[in-house]
Image: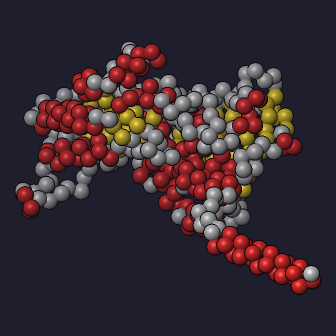
Amino acid sequence: TITQEDSTAANAAAHQKDSAEHDESEAPLIKPISSSSIKRLVAGQAITDLSSSVKELVDNAIDAGATRISIKLYNQGLECIELIDNGNGVLKSSRPYMAQRHATSKLRQLEDIYTGACAPTLGFRGEALFCLANLSRSLKVSTRTVEDESLGESFCFDTQGELIADSIVPTPRSVGTTVSVIGLMESLPVRRVDMCKRIKAQNMKLMKLLQGYAILCMGVQFTFTDVATTTAAKNKKTVVRLATSDSSKTMEARVASVLGTKYLAGLTRIELDLQSAVNDNNNDSVEAEKNHGNHMEKWSMSGLISHSPTSPNPGNARDMQFFSINGRPVDLPSVSRVIGDVWRTFDPSIEGSGGGSKRSGRRPACVLAFTLPASMYDVNLAPDKREVMFTEETLIIGCIRDGLMKVWSEQSEGKFRANEVEKRSAVAKAANPVAKLSVTQEPSTQNEEHSSRAEESVVCDD
């Protein structure tokens, strides 16, 4: 009996061992990534550097109805990024969800992007504050709405986007929102080291981005300052790098304020009707936009572009290019390419032909605003929403090419006529407008060539 029991126990043990080895050999190689790792991976895609961080905050402020936006960088953004707006603020019931992933008030279903339901808003993914909370040491928010009495609230979010309950503090402030991002990229050591090494280049990139917003977002007054807080500085210094006035209500006035009157003098007004491209699109969703109040829109491209290189007044505008679609600043390489192609057909500095052609180092400057049905373009290509795809790019590019040929041909044939841009430039020079700032500022930096170098600015004692 003892022998049989021992044998049975031995067989059971052997079977158990074989089963364990079999299970181990069949363990799946594909396993779900941990939620914390997923959040960090996603955050690192949406927020890549200093300019993308500020862009997301600016988009949120504009979507909240802000007419004044102040961006402050402490120690060039390495210590803290602070954005203050006078928008609608955030309701108490919505505050716990501000930094939750894919939580937004702007989008309910994907189709809203293409039917015009959320087209007026710059953001719709609901991931900006979540990503900033995940990648920074601390994310602090202060907000107040008109429904609040005299006090707003300030509170912080942890790295998972959860509101920290014991951080809520009543705060006296005006209606609007302030977001402070402290220690950006500290959760990704390699990104942080790279950011510290290339902080000057990242500031120059941010400056170009904000110049585009300041020119193209006509109803918003921008102020961009850098506060020096390093121990090397004897006193805290504030550098005013960009400022616009609420009196600048036209594109010409904005360009003169942001890029200078010399830049404006090198540009001419251009207006193109894109209705034919919209009609040829034959897209039923264009009709659907009528339900969202867009049926009165004129589909067009309008703005400023360099004079023809052979015109009597070619100007000397730097080759900076800014584009927007329905108020959204974007990058349009296809449009930039066709502008350059047409420009080269008029440029006398290009010699030879065929394989011996020589390209000019010059490139036309432009500030162009497109008004199009939401169904004719797609901004949902990249997290930063700067890249855009046209549904009928060939039609749109064809309209632009024909319009440019007409404008520059008239100038090249001696038909160039004085335009409103030159008149406004002359008035701007005489008036020498300077945006009113909360800190002392030398007027020359606002209207001259300070935008060509990010370091050229005005320094004021705090």
> Which residue sits furthest front?
1
Is 391 displayed left or right of 330 in the figure?
left
Is 376 displayed left or right of 127 in the figure?
left
Answer yes or no: is residue 17 visible: yes
Q: What colour scheme has been applied to the protein in the rendered image?
A: secondary structure
Answer yes or no: is residue 184 visible: no
Q: Residue at x 80, y 75 (%)?
A: 12
Q: Residue at x 54, y 30 (%)?
A: 109
Is 177 displayed left or right of 386 in the figure?
right
Which one is in front, 155 or 458? Answer: 155
Question: Looking at the image, is 385 positioned above or below residue 182?
Answer: above
Residue 249, horizontal then vertical, whole percent: 46, 26
Question: Looking at the image, is 282 positioned above or below residue 215?
Answer: above
> Which residue sits furthest left?
353
> Which residue sits furthest bottom?
3
Residue 371, horizontal then vertical, whole percent: 37, 27
Residue 226, horizontal then vertical, whole percent: 61, 51
Which one is in front, 335 or 460? Answer: 335
